[in-house]
Image (tube, rainbow, N blue to C red):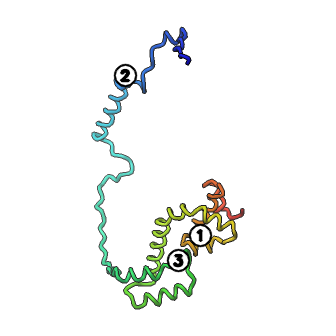
Amino acid sequence: MTTEKPRKKSRSQNRQRPKRYGNTKKSVLLERSQSYIEEVERKANNRFDRDVKPMGFPDVALEPASHSFDWKNNPVPLKDEELLAKFVIRKGEFGWLEDSRVDEISQFVADKNMSLDQALSLRSALLQQKTVYSHGRLKSRAKALFRLYNEGVSVVDLSKRFDFPPMNIFRVILTEKRWSKSRIKNACETRQK
């Protein structure tokens, strides 16, 4: 068993005072910059007592203009919105709709208290919500999606099968290939690779 002897300090280490932990004391910093602090406080307090008006303001105060609207408010009943939400969203259906699908939605909406534009807006909001809330599941299935992609399954088929947006699946696959975020972004923007 060996005993460790404390190392002997060199002459330069013996002459040095131990360093203070952290930065310079606050009292020392305040003392050093006392004149600057007083000048800044004086300027800050005097800014309210100016005789010269700031540039850009008119000499005469203008009266604010008032506007009035008559807006017909026609809220969509929650019951209709719930029915439409189930109809508008289909598994694996992301992005633009074909004309036949839009016609189908317009026929469904015809007897409801809702317009086609409101239905498509609702679809857009629901797809965005679905994308946000399913992101964790997408990340947890990244390896399986990558394996299936390598086996020859297309991104669109994976999207329909797992109900994730195709672009997000594509990004996850590239991430599994060890691509960086900047490389993925550049590849998606240029689309030449």
Badge 1 vs badge 3, beta-carbon distance below 8 Å: no
User: Is 132 rendered above or below residue 123?
Assistant: above
Occupied quadrant, residue 41 = top left
Give the structural element (helix, strand or loop) at label 3.
loop
Location of mark 2 (residue):
28
Left or right relative to 131: residue 38: left
Classed neighbour count for the residue bearing mark 2: other residues with Cα under 10 Å, few (<14), some (14–19), many (≥20): few
Q: Earlier in the sequence, mark 2 or mark 3?
A: 2
Q: Residue 166 — which label?
A: 1
Q: Position of residue 100 (x, y in %)?
A: 56, 87
Residue 105 seen in the current view: yes
**Label disc, if present, on residue 91 of the rendered structure:** 3
Task: Using the rendered image of the protein, determine whether residue 118 is visible from the camera's viewpoint.
Answer: no
111 displayed left or right of 45: right
Please tell me how many numbered marks the rendered image carries. 3
Q: Secondary structure at mark 1?
A: helix
Could you tell me which residue is drawn at 58 percent across and 62 percent down?
Answer: 142
Helix, strand or loop at disc 2?
A: helix
Q: Residue furthest front?
A: 1
Q: Please name the residue shown 36% across and 26% down the image.
A: 26
Label 1, label 3: how far apart the Cα atoms are = 12 Å
Q: Residues within 10 Å of mark 1 (few under 14, many from 20)?
A: many
Q: Earlier in the sequence, mark 1 or mark 3?
A: 3
Quarter holding the N terminus?
Answer: top right
The disc labelled 3 sits on which kind of residue?
Lys
